[in-house]
Amino acid sequence: MQDFISQYLDYVGNTESPTTYNRWSCISMIGAYLGRQYSFKFGHFDIHPNKYIMLIGTPGARKSTAIKVAKKIITQAGYNNISADKSSKEKFLLDLAGEDTTDLSDMLEQNIWGVKESGASEMYIACDEFNDFIGNGNVEFISLLGNFWDWNGPPFESRIKNGKSVSINDPTISILGGNTPVNFARAFPPEILGQGFFSRLLLIHGEPTGKRITFPVPPDPAATAFIVEQLIRIKSTVTGIATLTRTAELLLDKIYQTEKPLEDIRFESYSTRRFQHLLKLCLIISASDFSTCIKESHVVCANTLLTHIEHLMPKALGEFGKSRNSDITHKIMSILDTASKPIPLKEIWEYLHKDMEKVGDLAELLRNLATADKVLIVNGGFLPHKRVIEEVASDILDYSYLSKEEREVSK
């Protein structure tokens, strides 16, 4: 029998969303659904399968479709700890603690007689417009979410603005958000690059598939029921502490001992947590295989998927955090990424003349990009210089786990 992720990709195959969006939405859904019932012993701490995942692409890349389908499936499987589409830090903490904020007299009573014992400690933030949820530049909220990614400690306690206290046992957060590079820069100030939240976030770059389905066919109810049943099967069978086969253990050790930081300096903090990301993904891949034993094949699959999206994360981030001209540079690269032939300076200027004072500034930016090996000058025009992922023979990577579409995006 196929693993659950393969089953899910078959189920959502007839949509306009890129395969990589559907794949990582499914990965996020499994991690959220399992919560803390499945874990990996890691020294003094436990690692859980919750993930922070952001689908990033141009408007119309069908991020929302992938997120909404996953949200619908997990809801039908009985999961109801889903966040509001818009929240504040204070309201989020109350929701996470299971507090009812609709009855003001109840709130007053709790402030006088003490704090009501914490309820739900899990929350799945599944928002196709992530900025609507978190707002712009909300550093305190961002920092809080960063702390919850790998919480191992006593109950989280906080006193919020209205004087109410909350105590949350084992806060467990999963995130599946959608964003564009431009809106990502609005939500997250550049200093976020050095904070814990950014090191815990996976950026999933996707490109429009080119599919045009005029009248999407509703899914077969039997197919939907099957997917929901399989997700419930994961919940009922994948519990407790994960075990490792000896070959999987040796492979993970080899990966950890030989892994190198990402070339893009903006991901320096991410590289320090790369192995924890891999272990979380191994938990999800084994769960997708309806197993609590992490096998060699699970490690290879997880490492391949992670390596693939890491190759594209700089592209997902665009020019965020690079320079004072990062917004213009991002527009230039977006224009060139769609090119099938070299684009002359005059044509690029037609797109950007409202954003810049003179064409000479554009020419200088393009020269700088060429010097940085981001742009190629071909026959008087410009093309993006794309790095191709190396599909070399390896015992830690197997690109057959990726679809043809996913492998083409890497080129």
Image: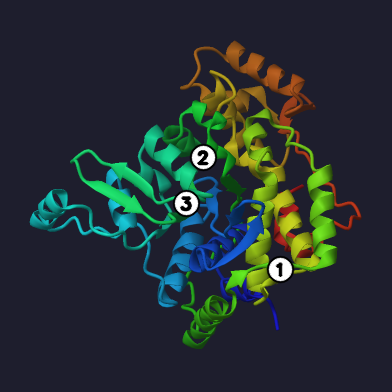
Q: Which label number is shown at residue 391?
A: none
Image coordinates of residue 411 in percent, x first then y, are 77, 47
The residue depicted at 50 percent of the width and 26 percent of the height is 191
Q: Amino acid at mark 3?
A: Gly
Q: Which label number is shown at residue 243?
A: 1
Q: Provide the residue designation for mark 3.
A: 177
Between 111 and 261, the one lying in front of the other is 111
Image coordinates of residue 207 in percent, x first then y, are 61, 50
- Measure how far apart labels 1 and 2 are at the Cα level: 28 Å
Viewer-nearest of discs 3 and 2: 2
Between 321 and 121, the one lying in front of the other is 121
- Measure how far apart labels 3 and 2 are at the Cα level: 14 Å
**Earlier along the polypeptide chain: callout 3 or callout 1?**
3
Q: Provide the residue designation for mark 2.
A: 197
> Furthest-right residue in view?
393
Q: How many C-alpha atoms fall within 10 Å of the one at disc 2: few (<14), some, or many (≥20)?
A: many
- Measure how far apart labels 3 and 1 are at the Cα level: 31 Å
Image coordinates of residue 356 in percent, x first then y, are 50, 17
Q: Amino acid at mark 1?
A: Thr
Label 1: which secondary element: strand
Viewer-nearest of discs 3 and 1: 1
Q: Is residue 235 left or right of residue 132?
A: right
Q: Is residue 220 left or right of residue 293?
A: left
The residue depicted at 68 percent of the width and 75 percent of the height is 289
Q: In the rendered image, which quarter is residue 198 located in?
A: top right
**Earlier along the polypeptide chain: callout 1 or callout 2?**
2
